[in-house]
Amino acid sequence: MSTRITCFLINHGIIPSPNKITILNAFLGLLTAIIIPFNPLIGGVLVQLVSIFDGVDGEVARLTGRTSRFGAFLDSLTDRFVDTSIIVSTSIHLLHILPPSQAILLSGAVLFSSIMGSYVAATSKTT
Protein backbone atom coordinates (compact mmCIF):
# COMPACT_ATOMS: atom_id res chain seq x y z
CA MET A 1 0.00 0.00 0.00
CA SER A 2 2.79 2.45 0.84
CA THR A 3 4.34 1.91 -2.58
CA ARG A 4 1.10 2.99 -4.25
CA ILE A 5 1.00 6.14 -2.15
CA THR A 6 4.65 6.86 -2.92
CA CYS A 7 4.10 6.35 -6.66
CA PHE A 8 1.06 8.63 -6.56
CA LEU A 9 3.07 11.38 -4.85
CA ILE A 10 6.03 11.06 -7.25
CA ASN A 11 3.83 10.84 -10.37
CA HIS A 12 1.92 13.98 -9.35
CA GLY A 13 5.03 15.99 -8.55
CA ILE A 14 4.29 15.98 -4.84
CA ILE A 15 7.71 15.27 -3.39
CA PRO A 16 7.93 16.39 0.24
CA SER A 17 11.10 15.94 2.26
CA PRO A 18 11.35 12.36 3.56
CA ASN A 19 12.06 13.76 7.04
CA LYS A 20 8.86 15.84 6.89
CA ILE A 21 6.93 12.68 6.00
CA THR A 22 8.54 10.95 9.01
CA ILE A 23 7.53 13.77 11.36
CA LEU A 24 4.00 13.95 9.94
CA ASN A 25 3.57 10.20 10.38
CA ALA A 26 4.90 10.46 13.96
CA PHE A 27 2.27 13.10 14.76
CA LEU A 28 -0.42 10.89 13.21
CA GLY A 29 0.85 8.02 15.37
CA LEU A 30 0.72 10.11 18.54
CA LEU A 31 -2.78 11.31 17.65
CA THR A 32 -3.73 7.67 17.18
CA ALA A 33 -2.38 6.83 20.63
CA ILE A 34 -4.55 9.57 22.13
CA ILE A 35 -7.67 8.30 20.32
CA ILE A 36 -7.33 4.57 21.12
CA PRO A 37 -8.60 4.63 24.74
CA PHE A 38 -11.63 6.71 23.72
CA ASN A 39 -12.51 4.99 20.45
CA PRO A 40 -10.58 1.76 19.84
CA LEU A 41 -12.26 1.10 16.48
CA ILE A 42 -11.15 4.42 14.96
CA GLY A 43 -7.81 4.00 16.74
CA GLY A 44 -7.36 0.58 15.14
CA VAL A 45 -8.03 1.99 11.68
CA LEU A 46 -5.55 4.79 12.35
CA VAL A 47 -2.91 2.28 13.52
CA GLN A 48 -3.20 0.61 10.12
CA LEU A 49 -2.85 3.97 8.33
CA VAL A 50 0.22 4.85 10.41
CA SER A 51 1.71 1.49 9.50
CA ILE A 52 1.06 2.04 5.79
CA PHE A 53 2.44 5.60 5.80
CA ASP A 54 5.52 4.48 7.73
CA GLY A 55 7.03 3.10 4.52
CA VAL A 56 6.45 6.21 2.43
CA ASP A 57 9.32 8.27 3.87
CA GLY A 58 11.97 5.68 3.06
CA GLU A 59 10.53 4.99 -0.38
CA VAL A 60 10.50 8.70 -1.25
CA ALA A 61 14.06 9.04 0.06
CA ARG A 62 15.33 6.15 -2.06
CA LEU A 63 13.45 7.16 -5.22
CA THR A 64 14.62 10.77 -5.03
CA GLY A 65 18.17 10.05 -3.90
CA ARG A 66 17.64 11.80 -0.55
CA THR A 67 18.60 9.01 1.81
CA SER A 68 20.66 9.98 4.85
CA ARG A 69 21.89 8.48 8.08
CA PHE A 70 19.99 11.16 9.97
CA GLY A 71 16.76 10.29 8.12
CA ALA A 72 17.19 6.60 8.94
CA PHE A 73 17.86 7.47 12.59
CA LEU A 74 14.87 9.85 12.75
CA ASP A 75 12.60 7.21 11.20
CA SER A 76 13.76 4.54 13.63
CA LEU A 77 13.45 6.86 16.63
CA THR A 78 9.95 8.06 15.76
CA ASP A 79 8.85 4.48 14.98
CA ARG A 80 9.83 3.34 18.48
CA PHE A 81 8.19 6.39 20.06
CA VAL A 82 4.94 5.79 18.17
CA ASP A 83 5.01 2.03 18.84
CA THR A 84 5.46 2.59 22.57
CA SER A 85 2.75 5.27 22.68
CA ILE A 86 0.26 3.01 20.90
CA ILE A 87 1.10 0.07 23.18
CA VAL A 88 0.65 2.22 26.30
CA SER A 89 -2.66 3.66 25.09
CA THR A 90 -3.90 0.20 24.13
CA SER A 91 -2.89 -1.02 27.59
CA ILE A 92 -4.97 1.75 29.12
CA HIS A 93 -7.94 0.58 27.08
CA LEU A 94 -7.31 -3.04 28.07
CA LEU A 95 -7.46 -2.04 31.75
CA HIS A 96 -11.06 -0.98 31.13
CA ILE A 97 -12.16 -4.21 29.45
CA LEU A 98 -10.08 -6.94 31.15
CA PRO A 99 -9.21 -7.82 34.71
CA PRO A 100 -6.07 -5.83 35.65
CA SER A 101 -3.83 -8.90 35.92
CA GLN A 102 -4.77 -10.04 32.40
CA ALA A 103 -4.41 -6.54 30.96
CA ILE A 104 -0.96 -6.12 32.50
CA LEU A 105 0.22 -9.57 31.38
CA LEU A 106 -1.01 -9.03 27.82
CA SER A 107 0.42 -5.50 27.65
CA GLY A 108 3.76 -6.73 28.99
CA ALA A 109 3.91 -9.48 26.38
CA VAL A 110 3.19 -7.01 23.57
CA LEU A 111 5.77 -4.53 24.87
CA PHE A 112 8.37 -7.30 25.21
CA SER A 113 7.65 -8.48 21.65
CA SER A 114 7.97 -4.96 20.31
CA ILE A 115 11.30 -4.38 22.04
CA MET A 116 12.67 -7.75 20.96
CA GLY A 117 11.55 -7.23 17.37
CA SER A 118 13.43 -3.94 17.22
CA TYR A 119 16.46 -5.47 18.93
CA VAL A 120 16.62 -8.45 16.57
CA ALA A 121 16.24 -6.21 13.53
CA ALA A 122 19.01 -3.87 14.71
CA THR A 123 21.30 -6.70 15.72
CA SER A 124 20.86 -8.59 12.46
CA LYS A 125 22.08 -5.53 10.54
CA THR A 126 25.35 -5.42 12.49
CA THR A 127 26.26 -9.11 12.20
Image: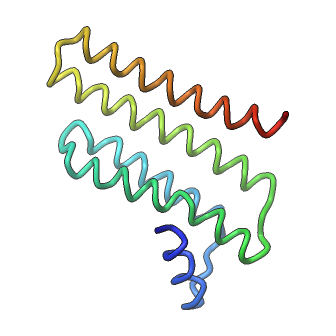
Tell me the quarter of the image containing the C terminus.
top right
Residue 124's x, y, as percent? 76, 35
Q: How many marks?
A: 0
As rendered, which of 27 and 59 lies closer to the eye? 59
Q: Is residue 39 above or below residue 88?
A: below
Quarter of the figure with residue 11: bottom right
Residue 88's x, y, as percent? 38, 28
Q: Residue at x 50, y 51 (%)?
A: 26
Quarter of the figure with residue 40: top left
Quarter of the figure with residue 92: top left
Q: Residue at x 79, y 74 (%)?
A: 65
Q: Is residue 6 above or below residue 52?
A: below
Please state if 1 lies on the left or on the right of 9 as rendered: left
Please state if 75 lies on the left or on the right of 85 as rendered: right
Q: Residue at x 39, y 59 (%)?
A: 49
Residue farthest bottom in this picture: 12
Residue 74's x, y, as percent? 67, 49
- Please, which colouring scheme is shown? rainbow
Residue 1's x, y, as percent? 46, 68
Residue farthest top in this picture: 101
Q: Residue at x 58, y 45 (%)?
A: 78
Q: Is residue 24 above or below residue 127?
A: below
As rendered, which of 39 and 52 lies closer to the eye? 52
Please state if 117 lies on the left or on the right of 30 as rendered: right
Residue farthest right in this picture: 127
